[in-house]
Structure formats: C-alpha cells, structure tokens
Amino acid sequence: MKIWVDADACPNAIKEILFRAAKRTGRTLTLVANYPSDVPSYVEMLVVPKRFDAADDKILELMTTGDLIITADIPLAAKALEQGGYVFNPRGDEYTSRNIGERLAMRDLLESLRGGAEPVGGGPPPFNNRDKANFANQLDRFLVKHQA
C-alpha cells in the first residue's frame, strides 16, 4: 500500500505526521502538488502542471487498489474509492462508500447555493490541534490494521 497526498491544500502539520508515519512504517509516501515543497529524502514529491485537477488526475492515474489517499477534495475521494482506495481527509475523517454520496450531495448543494445571489457560509472551521490529533490517531489505527 502506498500513501498519496493531494498536497497543495494539505496542512503542513498533517504532512509532518505523514512523514513520520512513512519513516516508521517504511510505506511509500508521495506528495502530489502544483508547487514543489521540501520533503525528507524518503518521501517522493511529484510536481504536476498548474492546471485545474492536475494533482487529482495524477493521483487517480498512479494509485492502485488498497492505496491510501489523503485529500479534502470530495470528487477526488469519490473517484479514489471507486478505484478501490482508502481515503482520509486532513482532519482524520474517513470517506467510505457509505458516506461519500452524502458528502458529494452536500458539496454540490453548497456549490449551487454559492452561485446564487445570497452568500452562503465561509467554509470549514479553521484547522486546529484537535483535528491534527484526530488525523494522527486515525492514521495510526489504519496503518496498524493494514500492516504489510
């Protein structure tokens, strides 16, 4: 199992947790982004063209069944699940076949409301230490459960 990260919008604190987990477990960790960033020597950094969904498309092209994808992008999560991947968002929530339909519907609803005249919400709450701890705990449980 490889770990793929939709890295442009992934918080640095989550990347650090993933770096430590990859080193500890020996899992291949690849960050996919439109912009390069510094990563440890044991982490792969894949820079894709600066176009809409380029990182998403590359992850879907390269991932295989059983890989873990880290993304907050709901459409990417849905497609990765269809391809047999496991998906967590950076807050530690797991996307599954049971909850992805609801998440897609809510995303589409909010997107259509934003297109109207009335402003709608300001997005998710700010990333905090509880989110970081939740992600770390979920990742650890997942990696123990899926040891090679």
Image: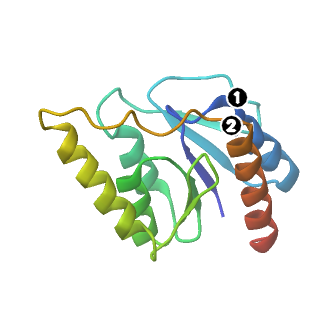
Q: Earlier in the sequence, mark 2 or mark 1?
A: 2
- Circle on res. 39: 1
Q: Residues within 10 Å of mark 2 (few under 14, many from 20)?
A: some
Mark on residue 9? none
Identify the amino acid type marked 2.
Lys
Q: Secondary structure at mark 1?
A: loop
Which x, y percent locates residue 102? 36, 67
The residue under label 2 is 15
Toward the viewer: 81 or 41?
A: 81
| Residue 81 image point, x, y percent | 45, 68
Between the residue at mark 2 and the residue at mark 1, the CA separation in whole angstroms equals: 9 Å
Secondary structure under tag 2 reads helix
Looking at the picture, which amino acid does disc 1 mark? Val
Q: Nearer the viewer, mark 2 or mark 1?
A: 2
Q: Please, which residue is most extreme toward the left here?
A: 117
In the image, residue 32 lies at what x, y percent? 51, 38
Q: Is residue 141 left or right of residue 60?
A: right
